[in-house]
Amino acid sequence: MEEFNSWKDLLNPEFYINMGGFWVILFIIFAETGLFVGFFLPGDSLLFVSGIYAVDIISKTFGSTGSDFFDTTLLASAVAFAAIVGNQVGYWFGSKTGPALYKKEDTFLFKKKYLYQAHDFFEKNGALAIIMARFLPVVRTFMPIVAGIVKMDKKAFFRDNIIGGILWSFSLIFAGHYLDKLFLDQFGINLKEKLEFIIIVIVLITTVPVILKFVFGAPKENPKVEDEVLEDLIDKEK
């Protein structure tokens, strides 16, 4: 069992894999959208690193199938299921809370500005936003809530949720698994020994564009725009 030494461990995917493996990974993926507190957790890097350890994770949990491909597929399928269920919970929560969530005061785990950013992203990209949001940290945490608040068609959301969950989990987990094998076979590089560098690269690729958008894409405070968004949502509740 991995011991918690510092808050830095919370950003280290290997910590979660060593701490609880399969079940902890599923909980984190579910919590990211189902409990709305996972925007600071290593979602993308966790899946990539989980792909590297896929065979070990499945072997320790259920026993290996004897095939790298099937072990990795089993892990990716379970993660996709957790991601899909998490989004459905987020959608349900958004549909029940509606505009009241926009009036909620900011806390350490909840930032209202993220709701507005997700709302703008949804308005700009429509139903495709549900799929695209899977690959965008922070946005994917709040997108299903916004979809529920704006009363997106349930069947359409469920369809896009399934597509996005499968694409996200399978692409990152299989990339981690087979890139590890490729680098080891072709270049003699063990990615397990380069995890810190890999995590930094993934965080930069996925997070920097979002941060730049949040910082430079729109004014930090625009009460008029926020009031208009809230009024539109209240109208939809009526």
Image: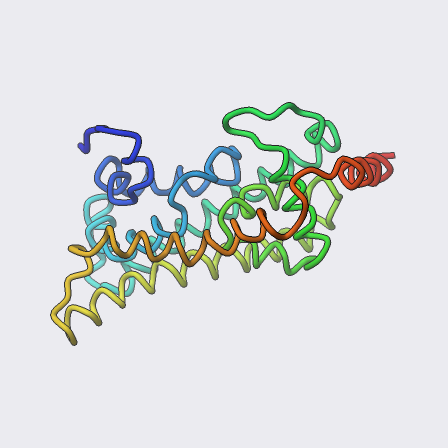
Snapshot colouring = rainbow
Say which of 57 and 129 sits in front: 129
Q: Residue at x 30, y 59 (%)?
A: 72
Residue 133 position, x and y percent, is: 56, 53
Q: Residue furthest left?
A: 188
Q: Is residue 75 left or right of residue 36?
A: left
Q: Quadrant of residue 191?
A: bottom left
Say which of 75 and 229 sits in front: 229
Say which of 84 and 181 sits in front: 181
Q: Is residue 196 left or right of residue 233?
A: left
Residue 44 position, x and y percent, is: 40, 52
Screen quadrant of the N terminus: top left
Q: Residue at x 49, y 48 (%)?
A: 137
Q: Residue at x 51, y 56 (%)?
A: 209
Screen quadrant of the C terminus: top right
Q: Is residue 28 left or right of residue 49?
A: right
Residue 111 position, x and y percent, is: 58, 32
Q: Is residue 195 left or right of residue 29?
A: left
Q: Is residue 53 above or below residue 107?
A: below
User: Total of numbered circles in the picture?
Assistant: 0
Q: Quadrant of residue 171?
A: bottom left
Q: Is residue 56 above or below residue 1?
A: below
Residue 68 position, x and y percent, is: 23, 63
Q: Residue at x 55, y 60 (%)?
A: 163
Q: Residue furthest bottom?
A: 186
